[in-house]
Image (cartoon, rainbow, N blue to C red):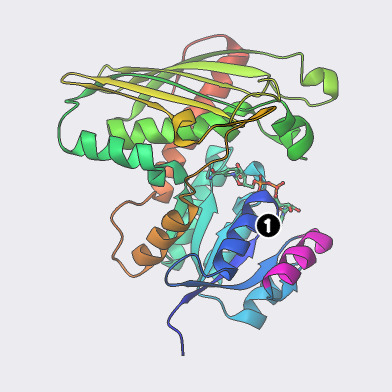
Amino acid sequence: MSNDKRFLVVGAGTMGGGYARMLAAGRVPGAALAGVVDVDGARALEVAGETGVPAFGDIAHAVADTEPDAAYVATPDALHRKPVQQLAEAGLAILVEKPLATTIEDGQAMVDAVRAAGVYAEVNYSNRWNPPFVEASRTVDNGELGEIRSFNVRLNNPIGSPRARLTWSSGTTPAWFLMSHCLDLALWLGGQRAVRVYASGGRGELAGHGIDTPDWIHATVKYANGGDGVFESLWILPDTWPGGAEFNFRAIGTRGALDVDTSYQNISVVTDRHRYPGTLNWAPQRLAAFVRSMDGLGRTRVTFEEGLEVTRILVAIHRSLESGNVEMV
Ligand SMILES: NC(=O)c1ccc[n+]([C@@H]2O[C@H](COP(=O)([O-])OP(=O)(O)OC[C@H]3O[C@@H](n4cnc5c(N)ncnc54)[C@H](O)[C@@H]3O)[C@@H](O)[C@H]2O)c1
């Protein structure tokens, strides 16, 4: 019998559907797909049909029927808590999508749930496996950068993402959805806790389309070592933006500097229009790392405590956005 870890995918949308197909296609060493769960029955059936596993409308039946080893949770940003609590009680290892939570209460409840159940759990801040950031991490670990003093990061999406792709963009913000990745990378590479934040943003374009969330959020973060980070996340790039997203990351240290522009991961194809198809998909490596870590063998991880730290910073950023004041983390 195979020793592959069998995964339940909870939430069969863009991410869950993608991970389910990747598992079913055998692209993650040591892992297999056990079943697919979605509250939207048609979605669960569609992904399950494509991948040849059973579909379920709820976690309890899925766990009882398929007896999986682990679960990948890809429900909307604000809806991670209940599935995580239920899966922890069922004794499964859990990989939950970022952001861990959109309130500190939800995040703490999830930290408590996995601790009480003693299950292996990580947050899917998947950019830690994105090749340019793997290289950035090596550079930091080698001491080539010294101590990082300044981060300048922007991660932005075309307006089609909140308007057409996501059905729940009113229930989150570009900071929860995008800036969370940037804050996690700064936490991972800089190794410093955030002390206080100031945020400013604006609304109008998305609100005009009935989507109640800011168009853009800019935040500055002061870190415990005195360093600063400037972060920008917005959801109003034109849909013609090449590559589908803009991701620039700069870190300046006491001994060196690094700059990542993820546009250059792509190949450009210019015919009667331009295309930049991605050449690198690191999702299988990320999931394979989780599988190795379930057996204590992984090197890079994203703990629930780190996930909660990013949630804490983002809660203060959203508080500052409302109050117009500097807010303590
Ligand atoms: N790591 C990354 O790079 C990355 C990229 C995009 C999105 N995400 C994260 O992944 C998560 C999902 O995003 P998405 O783009 O796939 O969203 P999506 O809307 O495409 O899919 C979400 C799915 O969850 C289902 N769902 C809602 N509540 C549920 C519940 N209680 N139980 C089971 N299913 C439920 C919905 O019906 C939907 O099919 C979000 O937290 C998002 O921030 C991560």
Left or right, 146 with reference to 33: left
Q: Which residues are magenta?
A: 39-51
Q: Quadrant of residue 73?
A: bottom right
Residue at 62 percent across and 28 percent down: it is: 157
The residue nearer to you, when weighing 215 against 135, is: 135
Q: Quadrant of residue 174?
A: top right
Left or right, 102 with reference to 4: right
Residue 15 higher or lower than 314, as above or below: below
Residue 301 higher or lower than 212, as above or below: below
Residue 292 higher or lower than 278, as above or below: below
Q: Quadrant of residue 51?
A: bottom right
Residue 14 higher or lower than 298, as above or below: above
Q: Is mark 1 within 8 Å of ligand 1?
A: yes
Locate residue 125, reporting x and y percent: 46, 44
Locate residue 225, reporting x and y percent: 24, 21
The residue nearer to you, when weighing 263 against 143, is: 263
Residue 113 visible in this rendered orientation of the protein: yes
Residue at 65 percent across and 42 percent down: it is: 78
Left or right, 131 with reference to 92: left
